Image (spheres, helix red, strand yellow):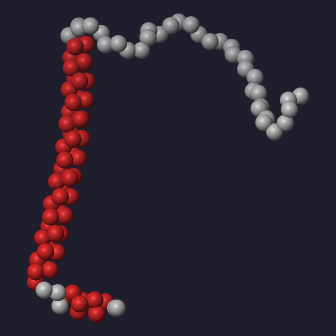
């Protein structure tokens, strides 16, 4: 069946089939748009929640509240020299 024959078959379909196909296509597009809107809405709510928590901590630190736990204070120890040895492990025979 070539393209011309396919179009002839489509043109012979009754109006009811065409209307159902158009309604199905419209429903599919509406559901796709609503699905995208739901996903975008959830992402926006999560982003706003994260920003609210960050802003709350920032304001608390700004006005002298209890400091938020962070990394430990920097120690003054310095590593001057390190000695290391590279060991090549071989699994294909006994060690000598």
Image coords of residue 53 (percent x, y): 23, 24
Q: Residue furthest right?
A: 96
Identified at 77% across, 31% down, the residue is: 88
**Where 1 sits versus 33, above or below?**
below
In the rendered image, which quarter is residue 7 located in? Answer: bottom left
Number of numbered discs on residues: 0
Residue at image coords 50%, 7%: 75
Q: Residue 91 at what x, y percent from top left?
A: 78, 36
Residue 5 position, x and y percent, is: 28, 93
Q: Position of residue 65 (x, y in %)?
A: 23, 8
Horizontal side of residue 1 vs 50, given as left or right: right
Residue 70 located left or right of residue 29: right
Q: Is residue 86 above or below residue 28?
A: above
Does 73 sit above or below residue 54? Answer: above
Residue positioned 18% across, 89% down in the render: 11
Q: Quadrant of residue 80?
A: top right
Q: Quadrant of the N terminus?
A: bottom left
Camera-side residue: 8 or 78?
8
Tell me what residue is drawn at x 12 percent, y 70 percent: 23
- In which quadrant of the rendered view does residue 94 lie? top right
Image quarter where the C terminus lies is top right
């Amino acid at each position: 069946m070539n393209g011309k024959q396919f179009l002839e078959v489509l043109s012979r379909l009754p109006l009811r089939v065409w209307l159902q196909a158009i309604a199905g296509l419209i429903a599919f597009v509406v559901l796709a748009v609503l699905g995208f809107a739901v996903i975008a809405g959830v992402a926006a709510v999560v982003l706003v929640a994260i920003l609210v928590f960050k802003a709350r901590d920032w304001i608390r630190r700004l006005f002298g509240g209890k400091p938020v736990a962070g990394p430990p204070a920097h120690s003054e120890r310095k590593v001057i020299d390190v000695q290391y040895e590279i060991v090549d492990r071989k699994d294909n025979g006994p060690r000598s």
